[in-house]
Amino acid sequence: MLSVQVQEKIERELRKYPADQRQSAVMSALRFVQDEKGWIESSDMADVANYLGMAQMAVYEVATFYHMYNLKPMGKHTLTVCTNLSCQLCGAEEVLGYIKDKLGIGIGEVTADGKFGLREAECMGACVEAPLLSVNNKRLCFRLTPAKVDQILAELGGQP
Amino acid sequence: MSLGSGPVIYTTLDFDQPWTLENYLKVGGYQALRMVLTEKIPPEHIIAEVKTSALRGRGGAGFPTGLKWSFMPRNYQGDKYIVCNTDEGEPGTCKDWDILRYNPHALIEGMAIAAYTMAVKTGYNYVHGEIFEAYERMEAACEEARAAGYLGKDILGTDFEFDLHNHLGYGAYVCGEETALLESIEGKKGQPRYKPPFPASFGLYGKPTTINNTETFSSIPYIIREGGQKFLELGRPNSGGTKLFSVSGHVNNPGNFELPMGTPFRKLLELAGGVRNGHKLKAVIPGGSSMPVLPGEIMMEVDMDYDSIQKAGSYLGSGAVIVMDETVCMVRALERLSYFYYEESCGQCTPCREGTGWLYRIVHRIEHGNGKPEDLDLLLELCDNIAGRTICALGDAAAWPVQGMLKHYRNEFEYHIEHKKCMV
Ligand SMILES: Cc1cc2nc3c(=O)[nH]c(=O)nc-3n(C[C@H](O)[C@H](O)[C@H](O)COP(=O)(O)O)c2cc1C
Ligand code: SF4
Ligand code: FES
């Protein structure tokens, strides 16, 4: 079952679209589920399908097509680092290497305490602030250096 | 980051909170919409004004905006839509992000005027998933506009009705392609549609639809307020107005700058603080990652407008300028870009799905010392088999960087193959 909070948020989204186009809210519905529990599993997709009157398969197609959905647990804080060209030129791979060492995990992995997950992304559309990462797809952190990474991790409650 | 304000779009940057309605009104905001509605300016006049301005689509293809608007069937009974493309995901490009962050009302006003012109009641703005904070700011700006009577029913006390909604993407470059974007708003995978039919006849939910880039819509208030001729004169004859340039990579002062079309690249580079650490300029991708790379010496003589860059062998594209200094290995740079197109291909067309994988694997093996002498010709042959043979332009976008790199830096690739290491 979708939580009441998620249902309320979906209702707000549904108002944006024609009444007979409930499927248009599927992307945000999946996003709200992920915001609440950190990832999306097939039972969530079934719930979203029921709520919007869609085939489960159609929800699955959407959840697997768009890269920002977590289809497995990705930790309390998912850090996503852009490594595309503008970021690469500004040292994104070095920053990513630093984060991997610091957290002791690779791309697509989660720390043992479940606090941090790490993902790599394509261009986030903020290239003039390279290199950069996002926290839980919500907040972008710019001009990363090892010191900045330390600060972000400490803020989020990891070891400094 | 530095931001260069300009007369058309980045007009509110001097304020502490550039994004508020209050500040937008101080720079002449919503005057154009008010004039259009209260004087009931005929839609044909608005289209004529936009044609005079020589405004061309800022999303990358440069299609004349006035002409595009004239394709919308005027007498169609039933719903029609306008859609804004803020799915900025072309590596290097982040100008529209700063429109949402710093002047969202310019976009709202531009879309409202477009809606009036094409007799549309509903608009959507599709926002790149990664810039969530900008999406929230845009949502807030729409609320603010609704409360002040610039969106919704009876706008500015007239019988004109238009509402605008934001739709957040969630990580798929191909959704920047306009028909993939429509599919995505419909709640599906973002796979581009066959054309024809074009969106003007069969668009969102199967209804007539016009799609423009964020910067394109945001130029409209100025054009209507000041006149198309004045906008045209800001730039060059075939490239009217100002352009937003995102300068990223190896410069001291990366940022977004609003400058007249035709501004020399030299000047833009200077505004961005020059090449970092006093290094030498090696190469520039002048219009977003899909456009062919040009050597620094050529760029230093180029003006930033459609014709000038095309003459030099590339395209203005989205206006994203990626600067590379002498330390850059072109094989490694191309490897990253080829991976991107491979990763983002939606997989519908065989030449793109298979071809982007081949391009990536070959450049990857060259970069890692396993390249063969015949690989370079194989790359070019693959490009010929992708470009122009696919449903959408992502296929071309994957081929152009390869062709550009091999045209100007073939020697670096040969060196890699022969010596199994980097020249730089
Ligand atoms: C793969 C691909 C990605 C694209 N990405 C964008 C984008 O991020 N923003 C954009 O405005 N146009 C993008 N376009 C171009 C759009 O399809 C479309 O031409 C444009 O939004 C039309 O608006 P305009 O005429 O105002 O430029 C992309 C095209 C392709 C093929
Ligand atoms: S060219 Fe590539 S991205 Fe475009 S429709 Fe074909 S497979 Fe999809
Ligand atoms: S390349 Fe990293 S944000 Fe664009």
Image (spheres, rainbow, N blue to C red):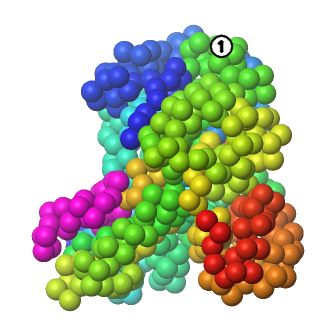
Amino acid on which the number 1 mark rests in the picture = Lys
Q: Is residue A97 visible?
A: yes
Q: Which residue is mark 1?
A: B230
Q: Quadrant of the N terminus of chain B?
A: top left
Q: Residue at x 62, y 83 (%)?
A: B368
Find the magenta span and give its range. A133-160
Q: Is residue A42 left or right of residue A76?
A: right
Query: From the viewer's perspective, is residue B281 above or below residue A118?
Result: above
Magenta includes B258? Answer: no
Q: Residue A28: where, in percent of width, then height?
A: 39, 64
Q: Residue at x 75, y 81 (%)?
A: B418
Near mark 1 (Cα within 10 A), the count class, few <14, some 14-19 or many ≥20, is some
> Which quadrant of the structure image shows residue A95?
bottom left
For mark 1, name the chain.
B
Q: As rendered, which of B321 and B68 lies closer to the eye?
A: B321
Q: Is residue A2 visible?
A: no
Q: Residue B275: where, in percent of width, then height?
A: 52, 43
Mark 1 element type: helix
Q: Residue A19: where, in percent of width, then height?
A: 46, 57
Query: From the viewer's perspective, is residue A130 above or below residue B28?
Result: below
Q: Residue at x 20, y 66 (%)?
A: A150
> Which quadrant of the structure image shows residue A34?
bottom left
Q: Is residue A83 left or right of residue B226?
A: left
Q: Is residue B301 left or right of residue A135?
A: right
Q: As rendered, which of A102 and B198 lies closer to the eye?
A: A102
